[in-house]
Image (cartoon, rainbow, N blue to C red):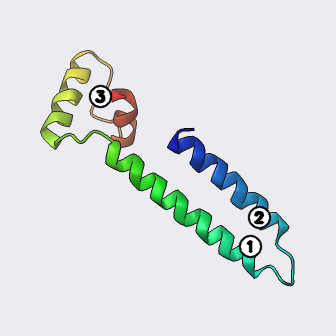
Amino acid sequence: MTHKQQIEALLETIKWFKKEIGPHDCGWMYTTIDGLKHRIKYLRSEIRKKAPRTSWIEGYDKWKELSKKGVVSNKVKLGDLKKIIR
């Protein structure tokens, strides 16, 4: 199971726990949810560690190359550009 799949499963679990919380004796559920959130945070940091790092110059060079091909223009948002490059 990949980290992204694990995160999705944990988020679904959190949703389930939140629906099950009652008015009494559910403190352990809040503790469990906090533990699941901590695990999600850890998995996201692991994903970031494995992501390739590029300098801004390399990113700009990729953007120039794509703009020459007509794929991007000056009005493309940074998030959209990252999606196009991948």
Is 60 in front, or is 68?
A: 60
Q: Are marks 2 and 1 in contact (CB under 8 Å)?
A: yes
Q: Who's the residue at 86% across and 76% down the image? A: 22
Left or right of residue 71: residue 57 = left
Give residue 2's position: percent from left, percent from top.
Answer: 53, 39
Q: Secondary structure at mark 3?
A: loop
Q: Amino acid at mark 2?
A: Phe
The label shown at residue 73 is 3
Graded by Cα atoms within 10 Å as few (under 14), some (14 to 19) or many (20 or more), the crowding at tag 2 reads some
Task: Name, please, the residue furthest toward the front.
Answer: 1
Give residue 17's position: percent from left, percent from top.
Answer: 77, 64
Write down the residue under mark 2.
17
Return the disc, 2 or 1, that comes first in the chain's sequence.
Answer: 2
Q: Who's the residue at 40% across and 33% down the image? A: 83
* Quadrant assignment, res 25: bottom right
Q: Who's the residue at 51% across and 44% down the image? A: 3
The label shown at residue 43 is none
Return the disc, 3 or 1, that comes first in the chain's sequence.
Answer: 1
Graded by Cα atoms within 10 Å as few (under 14), some (14 to 19) or many (20 or more), the crowding at tag 1 reads some
> What separation in Å lies between label 3 and label 1 (alpha carbons)?
49 Å
Please, is residue 69 above or below residue 61 in the view? above
Q: How many marks?
A: 3
Is 4 in front, or is 79?
A: 4
Return the disc, 2 or 3, that comes first in the chain's sequence.
Answer: 2
Q: Quadrant of the N terminus?
A: top right
Write down the residue under mark 1.
29
